[in-house]
Image (spheres, rainbow, N blue to C red):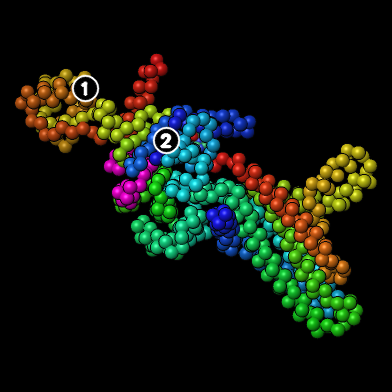
């Protein structure tokens, strides 16, 4: 569906047109029918990549094709739905008018448009505010209406820049269901986020962008496998008992609610667990800690440093 | 062939959709309403003079009314025109537009037409108000005015309004060009500057001829030839005192205005094409 090859983007900043390279090497592809998550910390270049794809900015180097056609072909946009990050809209329009304007720009036929507006307002739970001017919308309401306008042309390819931002937990779930529903209809979705929990329950594959470079593309499970995660082991015993059994280097020991909690990483897991099992100590539970996005980022940053040295 | 026609109609339709939205925006603009309110107050205030003498008053009220239309129309053209494109870039609403199959030139033309439509409606309304006041004052003295001044010059009055609207079309064009690359404050200043030069360009050339300095002459000649001569659109005195407004004058002035407008829109499009929506 989408191919981004060796994309480079310079922004000229300042008066004298000094250039800063915002995207250094961005390569990834999105296959038809999948949900692709584009993740990275603030300022990594997610939004800039999306703007390049949509031809809002000219690209410095590289190649972007959608369905095999270069992205500057404007007709492609008939099949694309786009949600800008923190959506700005015409605040003098009502929710309904906005959807109608956006649909008209797409050239959606009148009867179909009228039906679709009702349906979408229902879907994003904004039917009650359809006649309210957008200047009176809250941030989350704007986000919802933004998702609705992205779907106004029943697009084959959805590009959503942080679709969950500004939403309450119910809103998140609703938007997630909506995205999954689109996937079921055979649509392709590219979305960005810096919150891993959003993408992990949603995306088939992810691309990780760090500092303008896509450092990793693959299924999230593969990504996790490569990262050493921390474990917590809950024990019912006295602190002194533990000290007798395991060497405490690289292990942090805490007391929590009368239990002893050991914390260690993947490399230590086997050794520690074996020792505890051999001893008399009662083991309550062992669980992996949730891997955070920061974990992935730190890992990648560390790797990069290694290469550079 | 048929396909081409359909395609063209499709392009026009999108321009029109953008124009209508711009018109809607103007209709919900509070600043515009206060400007309109002011102009109506100014026009109505000319009623004060009606107590002086009806013979004089018919001139005063026409002159006053046309001046009010001109003044507020120019203000609205510049204030709304300089925000036209800039605001959409600044507020990032361009992302909503250009994620749809819209070409940039369609957007610029649509925005222009939207404001032109807005001003058409406003100019028509104001001129009707002025005309009603003129009728109110002149009808009781109808035979007197005909005898003494040679006529009511109603036709000339509306010709003057039409010429005035042609001037607005050029000023909106100037404003939209600036709107494509600079902030409203600067755009407003530059637009007013060009407007002033346009209104006085004939005077500037006269002045330069007096100076007899080749460099000054050279520049004044350039200004005279490049910047539209906005005095061409001023036929207020004909509307008030009568005078010859021939069909060929109307045609020539119309063509003059449309050519300038087209060039300005083209310039705006060329600038906007290159714009990055960062
Ligand atoms: N208009 C601009 N001019 C110059 N530099 C910019 C501009 N917009 C963004 N940048 C720079 O480009 C980099 C990438 O920004 P971008 O908005 O793509 O990040 P992001 O990954 O979307 O971040 P976030 O998660 O905060 O949305 C940043 O370092 C930012 O400083
Ligand atoms: Mg972003």
Q: Residue placed farthest to the front in the image?
A: B1
Q: CA distance from mark 2 to mark 1?
A: 38 Å
- The chain ID associated with circle 2 is A
How packed mark 2 is, by other alpha carbons closer than 10 Å (few <14, some 14-19, many 20 or more), is many
**Of helix, strand and loop, which one carries label 2?**
strand
| Residue B252: x %, y % from top left | 80, 59
Q: Tag on residue B140?
A: none
Q: Residue placed farthest to the left in the image?
A: A280
**Of the residues tagged 2 and 1, which is closer to the observer?**
2
- The chain ID associated with circle 1 is A
| Residue A250: x %, y % from top left | 23, 21
Q: Measuring 92% from the left and 46% from the top, which residue is drawn there? A: B209
Q: Is residue B189 above or below residue A108?
A: above
Residue B261 visible? The answer is yes
Magenta stretch: includes residue A191: yes
Q: Earlier in the sequence, mark 2 or mark 1?
A: 2
Relative to A210, A253 lies left or right: left
Disc 1 marks which residue?
A267
Relative to A289, B10 lies left or right: right
Q: Measuring 44% from the left and 38% from the top, which residue is drawn there? A: A68
| Residue B1: x %, y % from top left | 57, 54
Q: Nearer the viewer, residue B210 or B104?
A: B104
Magenta stretch: includes residue B31: no
User: What stretch of residues is rendered in magenta?
Assistant: A178-202
Disc 2 marks which residue?
A3
């Amino acid at each position: 569906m989408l191919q981004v090859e060796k994309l480079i983007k310079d922004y000229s900043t300042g008066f004298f047109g000094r250039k800063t390279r915002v995207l250094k090497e961005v390569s990834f592809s999105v296959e038809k029918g999948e949900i692709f998550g584009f993740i990275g910390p603030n300022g990594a270049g997610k939004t800039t990549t999306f703007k390049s794809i949509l031809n809002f900015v000219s690209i410095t180097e590289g190649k972007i094709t959608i369905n095999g056609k270069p992205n500057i072909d404007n007709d492609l946009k008939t099949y694309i739905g786009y949600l800008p990050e923190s959506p700005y809209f015409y605040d003098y329009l009502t929710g309904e008018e906005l959807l109608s304007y956006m649909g008209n720009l797409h050239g959606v036929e009148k009867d179909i448009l009228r039906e679709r507006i009702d349906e979408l307002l229902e879907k994003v739970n904004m039917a009650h505010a359809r006649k309210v001017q957008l200047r009176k919308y809250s941030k989350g309401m704007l986000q919802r209406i933004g998702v609705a306008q992205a779907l106004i042309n029943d697009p084959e390819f959805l590009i959503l820049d942080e679709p969950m931002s500004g939403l309450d937990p119910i809103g998140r779930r609703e938007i997630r269901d909506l995205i999954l529903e689109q996937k079921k209809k055979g649509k392709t979705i590219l979305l960005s986020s810096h919150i891993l929990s959003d993408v992990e329950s949603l995306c088939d594959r992810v691309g990780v962008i760090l500092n303008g470079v896509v450092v990793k593309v693959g299924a999230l499970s593969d990504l996790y496998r490569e990262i050493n995660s921390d474990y917590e082991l809950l024990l019912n015993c006295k602190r002194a008992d533990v000290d007798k059994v395991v060497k405490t280097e690289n292990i942090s020991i805490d007391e929590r609610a009368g239990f002893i909690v050991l914390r260690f990483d993947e490399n230590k897991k086997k050794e520690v667990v074996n020792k505890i099992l051999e001893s008399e100590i009662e083991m309550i539970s062992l669980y992996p800690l949730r891997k955070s996005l920061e974990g992935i980022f730190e890992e990648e940053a560390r790797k990069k440093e290694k290469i550079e040295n | 062939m048929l396909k081409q026609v359909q395609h063209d109609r499709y392009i026009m339709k999108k321009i029109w959709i953008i124009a209508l939205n711009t018109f809607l925006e103007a209709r919900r603009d509070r600043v515009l309403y206060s400007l309109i309110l002011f102009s109506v107050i100014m026009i109505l205030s000319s009623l004060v003079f009606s107590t002086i003498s009806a013979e004089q008053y018919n001139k005063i009220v026409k002159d006053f009314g046309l001046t009010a239309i001109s003044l507020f129309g120019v203000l609205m053209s510049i204030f709304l025109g300089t925000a036209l494109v800039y605001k959409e870039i600044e507020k990032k609403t361009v992302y909503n537009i250009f994620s749809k199959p819209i070409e940039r030139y369609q957007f610029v033309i649509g925005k222009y037409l939207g404001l032109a439509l807005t001003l058409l409606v406003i100019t028509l309304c104001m001129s009707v108000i002025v005309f009603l006041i003129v009728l109110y004052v002149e009808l009781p003295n109808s035979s007197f005015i005909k005898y003494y001044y040679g006529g009511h010059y109603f036709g000339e009055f509306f010709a003057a309004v039409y010429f005035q609207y042609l001037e607005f079309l050029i000023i909106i064009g100037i404003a939209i060009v600036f709107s494509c690359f600079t902030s409203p404050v600067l755009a407003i200043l530059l637009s007013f500057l060009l407007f002033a030069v346009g209104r006085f360009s004939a005077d500037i050339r006269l002045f330069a001829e007096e100076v007899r300095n080749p460099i000054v002459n050279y520049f004044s000649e350039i200004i005279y030839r490049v910047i539209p001569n906005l005095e061409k659109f001023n036929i207020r005195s004909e509307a008030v005192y009568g005078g010859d407004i021939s069909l060929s004058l109307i045609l020539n002035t119309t063509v003059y205005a449309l050519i300038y407008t087209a060039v300005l829109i083209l310039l705006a499009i060329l600038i906007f094409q290159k714009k990055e929506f960062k």
